[in-house]
Image (cartoon, rainbow, N blue to C red):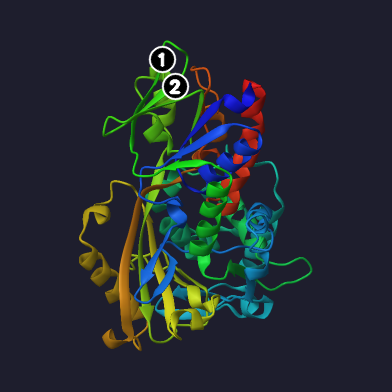
Amino acid sequence: MKDTKTFGIIGGGLMGMSLATKLNKEGYQVTIIEGANELGGLTTAWSYGDYIWDKFYHVILPDDQNTLSLVKYLGLQNQLNWKETKTGFFIKGSFHSMSNLIEFIKFPELNLIDKFRLGLTILAGSYIKDYEKLESIPVTDWLKKWSGKRTFEKIWLPLLKAKLGEEYKHTSAAFICATIKRLYGARKKGSKKEVFGYVTNGYANILEEYTRKLTEENIQVKTGFRVKDIEKTESGQLKVTSKDAEEIGFDYVISTLPSFLTATFKGLLTERERKTLENIKYLGVVCVSILIKKPLSEYYVTNITDSNIPFTGVIEMTAIVDKEHFGGNSLVYLPKYTNPKDPLFDMQDDEIINKFLEKLKAMHPGLKQDDILVRKVAKARFVISIPVMEYSRNLPSYKTSVDNFFIVNSSFITNGTLNVNETLKVSNKYLPEILKEIQ
């Protein structure tokens, strides 16, 4: 009977947790297998001195229906907080706000025609629905067509390089349109103001409640289990083996790991399947976070177009989150999205912090060494799959050549950017398909 069948979920991020709770409701015995010592993946939190908050920055947008459904499922909807935000640009050593129409019109780096074309670009990107067609158009060509060469060189190109490094040259127009659409989701219906949200106490609160739910629903969790391989046994089960030689058998398995990691399961997949998975390119992130005595600016996001600054942007979390959560101090993130082979990943934390803070102090001369209370570095080598040309056409199927073994991971995001909402959307999309295959 169905309720005796076992399901293994490889990967204990929010996607794996979401799949587990839904499969449990279908009557399966579910076990989540996670290599780290805690669930949550990129949404895990850590301490900033006396305070707990996310390792990497996250926000909820008014249009994030999947995330909002999760918050409701966990009973945390009354702990949602919303805050109007501002966006800044750092260009040629100066800060410029671009948070409303008046500031957009006054923006000094572009003339009126440039601004008009930039506005049209943003409008066009927010309404496009045919992402598959966009995958055949280089992002540079699409932006030059809509915004013009001058606006592309001054605004778009520095931002593309900051977000994608040199991989922007291989990226399709689907990336920028998904990004624009995501930002439009920050505007509540009927409002022209950007609004971002968070749950009180951040993702630490969400993960605590989610873990409690897993226990309540008798979903098994095995942390510290780093999967080495998966094999099909003579009995038809899938045997999952850890790097410490521990073994667990399941009737069905879903891997939510990054594609290249799933490709290492040589006892299971064909050479062709492994190559398809290995061909998916990823970007990683190195993120310095600091707790400081006073705010840097009024902006939640400061976009940086100066090429000599080693981080992608400045994310001032306490422009959204009440500073009282941090004892009146400010929490700032300095992310750098880069190739997984970037030497930055192998540098010592202190070396990275000093490199980043030197430039931050140059941007904000009022920031003194004594103002910095806590400094930390979070690293993840494989975070974002790069939406190269013809991306969705070259994705592997969620089905594999092995009966009852499936793949669902963040590389399946084809019409959005990586964030919690899109991750949950992927799990919601593919789980019904998997259930059709096995029922």
Quadrant of image for the N terminus: top right
Residue 411 point in image, percent of width and height: 50, 39
Rendered residue at 47%/56% (across/down) = 43
The residue nearer to you, when weighing 6 against 129, is 6
Q: Residue furthest top?
A: 234
Q: Report the side of 223 relative to 347 (left or right).
A: right
The residue identified by callout 2 is: 238
Q: Residue furthest right?
A: 190
Callout 1: 10 Å neighbours few (<14), some, many (20+)? few
The residue nearer to you, when weighing 124 against 59, is 59
Q: Is residue 350 above or below residue 373?
A: above
Please report whichever mark, 1 or 2, sits nearer to the chain's N-terminal start: 1
Residue 375 point in image, percent of width and height: 31, 73
Residue 214 point in image, percent of width and height: 54, 47
Mark linked to residue 233 = 1
State how far apart marks 1 and 2 are (Cα). 6 Å
Label 1 close to label 2 by CB (< 8 Å): yes
